[in-house]
Amino acid sequence: MGRVAFLLLLAAGVRPAAAQVQRPLNADQPTDTARVQLQVPLDSLVAEPLEAGPDSAHLVWLQTPPELKDLVADRVNCFETDVPHVFNGTVMSFVNYFTVRNRAYTQRILERQNLYFPLFEKYLAKYNLPQDLKYLAVVESALLPTARSRVGAVGLWQFMGPTAGDLRLVRNEFIDERMNPEKSTEAACKFLRDLYRQFGDWELVLAAYNWGSGNVQRAIKRNGTRNFWALYPSLPKETRNYVPTFTALLYTMQYANEHNLHSDELNYLYPERTDTVMISGRSLDLRKFSAQFGLDSGAMARYNPEIRKTYLPASIRNYALTVPHCVSVELAALDRNTLLDFCQVTLPPPAPITPVAPALDGADSTRTLVAAADKPVADKPKFRRVRHTVRRGESVASVAERYDVTPAQVRRWNELPRSKQTLTPKQQLVVFLPVETPETAPVVAAAPKPRIPAKLPLPTEKTTVAAVAPTETADADAPAEAKAEPAAKTVAARPARPVREVAAAAEPAEPAAPAPADDDSLPATYIVRRGDYLTKIARERGLLVAQIVAWNKLTSETVVPGQKLVFTAPTETEPGTLTTVATTTPAAKTRRASAPAVAPQAELPKTHLVQPGDTLYNISRRYQGVTVDQLRRLNHLKSDEVKPGQKLVIVQS
């Protein structure tokens, strides 16, 4: 009762001025001028306009209690800002929409509010613009930097291509700076400043931002007035609703607490500390870069929404890649050139050109062509059709990642709309996977691909193998060959881990201890569970899919529940394995020598087989005492470029 009495008292005594509260629009105007949309797109009001609903602003005005209308009008009238805040039936209909009928849409905006509003306020203050213009990005894109309209407008501020070109925003196959929050915000501030210099009225500025300055100028000249509400009937429908929507969102977000829009269940986003890495003159695979620092595959896309692909080309120049601050320590510990060389894009070799028999005068080449046509075409890819049943929580992106295809292919094969990201449980999808030819299967088993390290080691992560000092006494029954020449001991590298450097001990050591057991954080075997697939299993264990396929001699990448997988490499020595020399004495008692003896250093291998991603610099770091100049001189190299499979001399024989 006390709240009702307060509202009645407020309606009777604190009524706003009549000049600031406009009545509903006249009934003789077109019937669709102030209709309210019952539905909006998922994340934007303007990106994809939908058909108008059956309710009109006049009907909403009549159905709204007078106390609520007076309360909202009083709050709108008290806004201290230069942007438009006229209250009428159209504004009230949108206020009712954002606070009552579609609260979930408003709450999604409130989740992203703290992430982008500080950035908007910084640039609005820089160009001396009203701070409340930050709500314009809410109307345009609902604070989504990758929002795209059906007419081609992109980004937080929904710039069209020609406008972005005038504002010097870069747009090419790989980069679209309209989706860069900082650069697009500064461009929007410049654009709004120029529009205000042209019109001198913020309502006309907002109309020109949506419809175009030339169209608004012609409407002013045709109607002979510069008042937005006088031009209202001659504006297109989207522009008519643009200013009322802006005012309604301005009110809704400032009075969100009064309408109980905030909740503890919302996932509020906040700015993070970031750093930049300059990329110039070399390609960069963003997925390799993310995996190097333990980030998920989509992390770099979230920090750099303007990048349109999963990699940057070698033609990129002076691009500032944004990275999270949490990787700064590891980024500083790694050599920059080595890291960027490791993360370069590895492209497959070009397909061989099929030779064509020349047509010679006086020669009949029909038989040759017919015989060639009868032969099966080996280069033609073959695909098999796989049916996938959608599980709860799966999306188009997760299904594409499971089968190692792109989301665009999944949508095209199943005729899914581009806006649909989530899938219905038990929905049937079709995926086409390449079929391996029988000729290629034995080759993979006989000659497995060389290992590519999944992550570069830090300089502090070095495997130290202590050399064993020679003993004074030996077993009398041991053969002479064993006394003269110590047996060789092979140190096998762990799967999917780069080769570590081997350092010798500085003082005499005790007799050789048994080799430490493998790291039990990675089991040697694994039983496939329901819902597992090779990509997921390999990612969780830091392995490559090709490694699991080769080690288990699989004919395809499909696994079934209950299947047993092995995570250890074959026993034979692989390229790049280091060997160290140790002394073995069967059941002999040893004692430390009285005089300090110098421990022999581990012998260096004479040659090194170049692996993908190797450079002369990181090869020299693997072997103690070896420099880049020494490698270049021993192998008669004129440059620092090496190729996978090339054999380099490490020690001169």
Image (tube, rainbow, N blue to C red):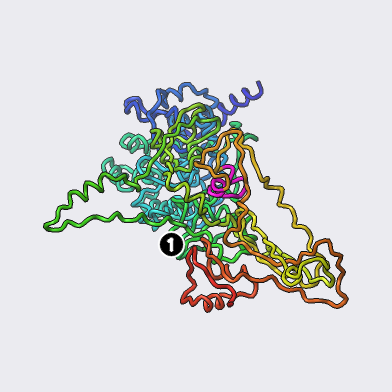
Q: What stretch is highlighted in magenta?
A: 536-550
Q: Which of 440 and 480 is in front in this view?
A: 480
Question: Where in the figure is residue 300, as x and y percent of width and height?
Answer: 53, 52
Q: Which of 209 and 470 is in front in this view?
A: 470
- Residue corresponding to mark 1: 314
Examine the rendered structure and indicate whether residue 20 appears above or below residue 185.
above
Which amino acid lies under the numbered mark 1 shown in the image of this protein?
A: Ala
The part of the image, by quadrant, that contains residue 478 is: bottom right
Determine if residue 418 is in view. no
Classified by dominant secondary structure, the portion drawn in magenta counts as helix
Residue 150 counted in the magenta span: no
Classify mark 1: helix, strand or loop.
loop
Residue 545 counted in the magenta span: yes
Examine the rendered structure and indicate whether residue 609 appears above or below residue 148.
below
Examine the rendered structure and indicate whether residue 114 appears above or below residue 230.
below
Q: Nearer the viewer, residue 450 or 398?
A: 450
Look at the image and tell me in which quarter the C terminus lies. Answer: bottom right
Q: Which of 430 and 303 is in front in this view?
A: 430
Question: Where in the figure is residue 539, as x and y percent of width and height?
Answer: 58, 46
Look at the image and tell me in which quarter the N terminus lies. Answer: top right
| Left or right relative to 504: residue 401 | left
Residue that appears at 49% across and 77% down: 636
The part of the image, by quadrant, that contains residue 650 is: bottom right
Circle count: 1
